[in-house]
Amino acid sequence: MELWVGCVAGALSDYEYVEKLAKAGCEKIDIEPTRVYDIDDARAFLSGRGINVDELAVQLEGKFISAFVRANKPAASCGAPVCYN
């Protein structure tokens, strides 16, 4: 449970992640889900932990995904690999 919580504790929503990539200068940002975790996955993560699995699993269903994230960062306009303004 600690490993799972540590993994998702700092997770961003897809919108937040795209926003941060765009702010960093990336273009053509694409998030391709490879797996959407369902209620059975949530039950497997949570079972045997001394919590109400049925109540929590319903709240988690479809809320977490694994994905490929792709983005392009155009060449810097100042001639250097990275420009610092």
Image (spheres, grey):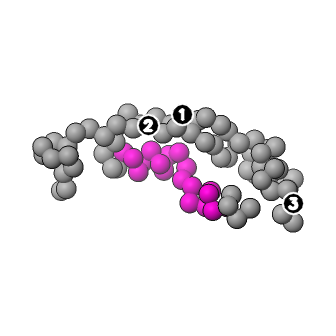
For mark 3, give the secondary structure.
loop
- Amino acid of disc 3: Gly
* Residue 16 covered by magenta stretch: yes
* Residue 73 covered by magenta stretch: no
**x, y percent for residue 21:** 39, 47
Q: Which mark is residue 70?
A: 2
Residue 11 lies in what quarter of the image? bottom right
* Image marks 2 and 1: residues in contact by CB distance under 8 Å: yes
Of callouts 1 and 3, which one flags the residue occurring earlier in the amino acid sequence?
1
- Amino acid of disc 1: Glu
Q: CA distance from mark 2 to mark 3?
A: 37 Å
Q: CA distance from mark 2 to mark 1?
A: 8 Å
Q: Is residue 56 above or below residue 50?
A: above
**x, y percent for residue 51:** 85, 64
Q: Is residue 2 visible?
A: yes
Q: CA distance from mark 1 to mark 3?
A: 32 Å
